[in-house]
């Protein structure tokens, strides 16, 4: 372990980004700072230093794929990384994706890409913890004796004009039409329909900005099947 390494400002931005969103591919981390640091080789070397110093880890789940050695490495933050962020005034009590690891990673990749693209367009990404901390509300929305739990929650600040998003990400593994399955399309659509008709997300999260339900698919065929359910 490289004990004498101290994170640079660039490395600290990576740590903060992972803490905000969840595990991140080296490709996304490079994209985060690519406007000032263009070399991917330099990015890999700096990430290696962060791993050797104990600030980052490599989640073992990424090795359980076909030809994993050819995929970009996925990094997560370790306790020393969190401690470093706290020492520099970062919020570390964030709302990261939960549940099955690969699903959570996909969610974190989606929000990461939105955050990076928004910043390049001059739009500020507001993470879930900043929204929820205002009212101390949990992510889960109570509805009809059950709970509606979005995969993620975030907002965009367009220079004083805001829009809030509840995010659902489909990797093609969820049931499609069984209403008894919590994360089936039919069940989720029914819950969201009832919640939005009764303005429950806005009331629960204390929102005044308009809200949009964003459903992201990893496959075109699933997206087309989803549209046929609407």
Image (tube, rainbow, N blue to C red):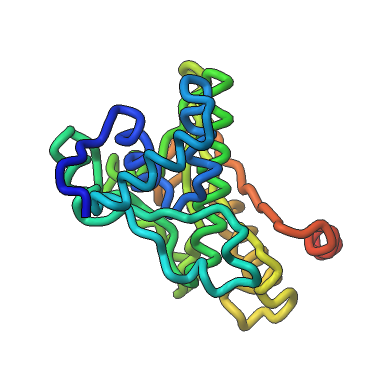
Locate residue 179: give its quadrant.
Answer: bottom right
- Apparent side of residue 92 relative to residue 199 in the rendered image (left or right): left
**Front one among 32 and 20:** 32
Q: Quadrant of residue 212?
A: top right
Q: Nearer the viewer, residue 218 or 207?
A: 218
The quadrant of the picture occupied by the C terminus is: bottom right
Query: Can you say whether 88 is above or below 92 in the image?
Result: above
Relative height, residue 145 to residue 131 (above, below): below
Q: Residue at x 45, y 34 (%)?
A: 42
x and y percentages locating residue 84 in the rendered image: 18, 42
Q: Is residue 24 above or below residue 194?
A: above
Q: Give coordinates of residue 41: x percent, y percent.
A: 50, 37
Nearest the camera: 12 or 220? 12
Q: Residue 73, image x and y in percent?
A: 50, 55
Figure disc tally: 0
Q: Residue at x 52, y 29 (%)?
A: 39
Identify the residue at horizontal 54%, vertical 49% (top origin): 109
Quadrant where the N terminus sits is: bottom left
- Residue at 42% x, 54% y is 75
Residue 160, image x, y percentages: 46, 18
């Amino acid at each position: 372990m490289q004990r004498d390494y101290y994170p640079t400002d660039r490395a600290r931005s990576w740590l903060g980004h992972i803490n905000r969103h969840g595990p991140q591919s080296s490709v996304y981390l490079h994209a985060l700072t690519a406007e000032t640091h263009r070399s991917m080789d330099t990015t890999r070397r700096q990430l290696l230093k962060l791993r050797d110093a104990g600030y980052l880890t490599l989640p073992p789940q990424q090795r359980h794929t076909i030809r994993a050695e050819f995929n970009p490495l996925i990094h997560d933050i370790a306790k020393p990384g969190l401690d470093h962020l706290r020492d520099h005034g970062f919020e570390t009590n964030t709302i990261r994706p939960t549940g099955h690891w690969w699903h959570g990673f996909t969610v974190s990749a989606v929000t990461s890409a939105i955050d990076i693209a928004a910043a390049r367009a001059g739009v500020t990404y507001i993470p879930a913890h900043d929204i929820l901390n205002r009212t101390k509300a949990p992510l889960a929305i109570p509805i009809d004796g059950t709970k509606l739990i979005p995969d993620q929650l975030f907002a965009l600040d367009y220079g004083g004009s805001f829009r809030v998003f509840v995010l659902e990400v489909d990797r093609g593994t969820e049931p499609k039409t069984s209403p008894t399955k919590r994360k089936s399309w039919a069940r989720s659509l029914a819950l969201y329909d009832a919640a939005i008709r009764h303005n429950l997300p806005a009331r629960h999260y204390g929102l005044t900005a308009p809200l949009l339900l964003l459903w992201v698919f990893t496959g075109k065929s699933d997206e087309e099947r989803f549209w046929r359910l609407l």
